[in-house]
Image (tube, helix red, strand yellow):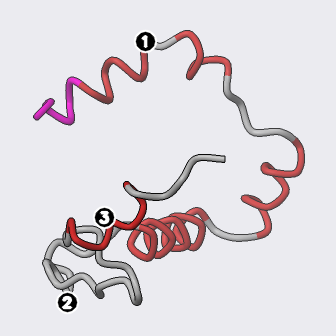
Amino acid sequence: MRDLDDLFSALRRSQFRSRQRPGPKERAYLESKSLDTVLEYGRRFVAGRLSPAEPANDGRQTPMRRRNNSNPRLHLPLLFQKIA
């Protein structure tokens, strides 16, 4: 895994990232809220979007109804159909 200091250093040197600047709407929003509030919104957004480290149903997938592709006998009628 890449060291975070190296990652942020590389992002700082990126030409694409250096061109990204907040526009008037973003500046007005940041001025109307405090920086701490905006950072807290960001933390909550990221925490809500990332998947949990230990999901509740890990390894327990619900089987599909009326579909059993693992049984080859179910495919035999398809082999003997006449092709029109």
Q: Label 3, label 1: how many angstroms apart (C-alpha)?
A: 61 Å
Q: State which quarter of the image contains the N terminus.
A: top left
Q: Are marks 3 and 1 in contact (CB under 8 Å)?
A: no
Identify residue for label 3.
76
Which residue is pictured at 67% across the width and 27% down the height?
20
Which element type, helix, strand or loop, lies under badge 1?
A: helix
Query: Where is residue 73 shown, x and y percent of the image?
Result: 22, 71
Specify which label sits upstream in the sequence, 3 or 1.
1
Identify residue for label 1.
13
Which residue is pictured at 19% across the width and 89% down the height?
56
| Magenta run includes residue 59 | no
* Range of magenta residues: 1-6
Which residue is pictured at 25% across the width and 75% down the height?
52
Give the residue type that dot 1 points to: Arg
Q: Label 2, label 3: how many angstroms apart (C-alpha)?
A: 38 Å
Determine whether 44 is above or below 3 in the image.
Answer: below
The foreground one among 83 and 70 is 83
Give the residue type that dot 3 points to: Leu
Give the residue type that dot 2 points to: Ala
Determine whether 28 is above or below 62 in the image.
Answer: above
Q: Image quarter for residue 22?
A: top right
Identify residue for label 2.
56
Specify which label sits upstream in the sequence, 2 or 1.
1
Q: Residues within 10 Å of mark 2 (few under 14, many from 20)?
A: few
Q: Label 2, label 1: how many angstroms apart (C-alpha)?
A: 40 Å
Specify which label sits upstream in the sequence, 2 or 3.
2
Query: Where is residue 75 shown, x and y percent of the image?
Result: 33, 64
